[in-house]
Structure formats: structure tokens, C-alpha cells
Image (cartoon, rainbow, N blue to C red):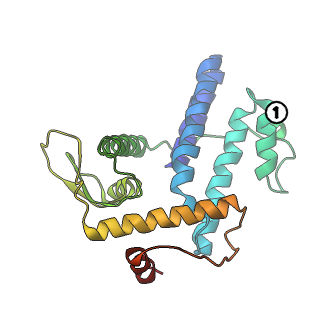
Amino acid sequence: WIVTRLNELIAESTAGYESYELDKATRPIADFIDDLSVWYLRRSRERLKGDDAADRALALATLRYALRTLALVMAPSMPFYAEYLYRAVRTEDEPVSVHLAAWPESGEVDTELLSDMAGVRELVTLALEARTKTGIKVRQPLRSLTLASELTPELALIIADEVNVKSVDYLPGQAERVVLDTTITAELRQEGDLREFIRGVQELRKTADLMPQDRVELIVETDATGEALLTTNP
């Protein structure tokens, strides 16, 4: 998806410059940066820091490719930041400056994929808004989200992860596009409490400027319920 978005950016920016319409050449840059940082990078966090070395290398390579190409597209309108970004990701065999590199060529733009992902993001927004209205935090897992139309398993998995539900179901013809099952069982409540605990620990680690590899001794003051939660979920 991010590669086809990059191809779309190159095509739009190239067309804008060739027709001397600078607004059309530069406006798509901000939208792409938003997609890259707010959606792609956040969705790829687990891959970028995961234990699978091969997959991590692929994710890093894709990110580097996206950032390098973005620097090339930004160069005519934002020359100084484009140079900074390019130098941060260039390899030794590449031109020393973004302004010495060739303009990128656009590859195939998969419009269907772009449309599908835009639909996924819209459904995620609606589901998160529904969570906000009920006052249920995203860290609290829910049993299901029911949609009015069916999606591919891959897209449904993205929605389930973003909204933090166990399953995505379908009910054609339902009045609302998204309907959350807000019934929180004891098991779901326990999982939500554990996530809140982990978030608290991570905040303490961040405050202490600890690195992921730094091991600590953790002392927890809690009641019997909390002790049971932590001992059954080491």
C-alpha cells in the first residue's frame, strides 16, 4: 500500500511540475507524509522492532525507500529539508546530494488497493468514534465489531487490530456501518486491565529513559485480584 501511495505521489507531483501548476505538484506531499507517519509507520511498529530479522529488514528497507523517494519529490519545493532527509537515508553508492539524484519514476498505481485502504481507515475512524461515545478505551479489548459490508480477511484483520476487537463480523443491511459489541466479559476485563498495567510500566520506563534491552526489577503493590492477574499472565 505505501509503495503504491508513493507511486501516486510521484505521478501527481510530476504532472503538476510538467504543467507548471506548482500547487498540484506540492500539495500531495503533505497528504503522503500524513499517510506515511500516521498510518503506515504506526501500523509497522511491531515489524520494525520485531524478533523476525528477515521481516524487520524488509520493513526497514521499505521505509528507507519511501523516505528516500519522498526526499527526491520534496527537493524542488523544500530543498533544505529534502537534503537533510536524503542524507539521513542514503547509501554510500548513491549521489552525495538529493539535488544530484535523478527525479523518481512512478510505478504502477493500484487504485483498487488505495480505495480499499481508504475505506478501512474510514471504518476504523467510525469504530473509534463509537468507542469514544461509550467511554471504552481502545486498550480494553471488545468481543466483536459488526460491519454492514464484507471485507477481505487481510483488511478485516487490520480493522480488528486497530479497533482492538476479537472478531469482525458482517450483517448486510444493518442500519449503522459499524456496530460495536460493548459487552465486557470477565475475561475481556482482565485482558484490558493487563494492558493498562503494561502501559503504566512502559510509561515508567520512558520516564526513566530506559532502552528496550534494559532489564529492571519491578515491585508491584496490589490486592489479591491484581496478584492473580499478574501471576497468571507473566
Tell me: 97 left or right of 154.
right
| Residue 108 shows up from this direction | yes
Q: Quadrant of residue 226?
A: bottom left
Residue name at image x 63 percent, y 26 percent: 26
Left-right relation of 82 to 120: right
Residue 220 lies, with reference to residue 182, above or below; the image says: below
How would you rate the neighbour count of disc 1 (Cα within 10 Å): few for under 14, some for 14-19, many for 20 or more? some
Judge by depth and name the residue closer to the eye, 18 or 34.
34
The answer to whether 124 is drawn above or below residue 19 in the figure is below
**Residue linked to disc 1:** 80
Mark 1, secondary structure of its residue = helix
- The residue lying at 53 percent from left, 37 percent from top is 8
Relative depth, front residue between 75 and 120: 120
Q: Tell me the quarter of the picture where residue 75 sits.
A: top right
| Residue 107 seen in the figure | no
Residue 47 at x, y = what percent?
56, 64
